[in-house]
Image: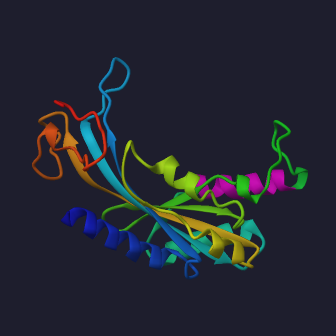
Amino acid sequence: MAARAAGVEEEQALLERAAMQPPITAAASDSCDAGEDSWKIHDSYYWICSHVTYWVVPEPQPDPVLIIAAYRAHLESIGCEPDEPSFGMAADYWATMRVAGENAHGEPYTVDSLPDVFATCGEDRRRVSLRFGTAAGVKGDALLFAFGGEEVIEQTPFDRAALQANTTPLVVTLTVGTKYHKISRYEDDEPDEPASPLGCACYSGSTCDCPGG
């Protein structure tokens, strides 16, 4: 659909601006989630569909604190608004726990343990998330399934060989997504395009529990 195609183009455009190096490898996930309407959770939608693009870029700088600062400055320079709490937390965690090499529970703490940071960009307030770590620590297929919905339309994994061949000390994984289709549960929550509950994104050969059948 047109909204999905436009969203993918916008994802690519933002990644090209946000990344400080060309990608080693890229991945993508396209999926739909069924909304829940129970005593505890009342989602405003029957189905919502999202596309997510991931880039892994090389990072020649071995010091995570300097990388975090460099990306904060770079994102500001392209007109994005870095989330200061997330950037500050990542820098503070590394400054505090890299010396001991473990967290407060005695578990090993490495650069791959750092929390994600993010920034909002452009008039549409599109969010870009960044994870700092090693090529060996990239989540790979697990990352796709962690973000994938109940109804998977398409998934393209990272090139594992490219990650293994990377020689830089660290890498940065950038993530940008688009919610391109929603079937609303309530009349006052307009869907992105006209559709009935029966119009959920179920494809030939797949199963789903669309409302109404």
- Spot occupied by residue 69 in the image (x, y as percentages of width and height): 66, 69
Q: What secondary structure is the stretch in magenta mostly built from? A: helix
- Spot occupied by residue 37 in the image (x, y as percentages of width and height): 29, 25
Give the extent of the magenta segment.
Answer: 85-98
77 to the left or right of 165: left
Residue at 17% x, 40% y is: 189
Quarter of the image with the C terminus is: top left
Residue 151 position by quadrant: top left
Q: Could you say which is closer to the camera, residue 70 or residue 109?
A: 109
Residue 58 visible in the shown view: yes
91 over 145 or under it: above or below = below
Extreme-right residue of the structure? 100
Residue at 45% x, 69% y is: 80
100 to the left or right of 40: right
Residue at 76% x, 74% y is: 169
Residue 212 position by quadrant: top left
Extreme-top residue of the structure? 39
Q: Could you say which is closer to the camera, residue 213 or residue 29?
A: 213
187 over 124 or under it: above or below = above
139 over 69 or under it: above or below = above
Quarter of the image with the N terminus is: bottom left
Colour mapping: rainbow
Q: Could you say which is closer to the camera, residue 38 or residue 70?
A: 38
Extreme-bottom residue of the structure? 22
Residue at 40% x, 74% y is: 12
- Spot occupied by residue 180 in the image (x, y as percentages of width and height): 27, 56
155 to the left or right of 185: right
Based on the picture, tell me whether residue 114 belongs to the magenta stretch. no
56 to the left or right of 180: right
Residue 69 visible in the shown view: no
- Spot occupied by residue 161 in the image (x, y as percentages of width and height): 65, 73
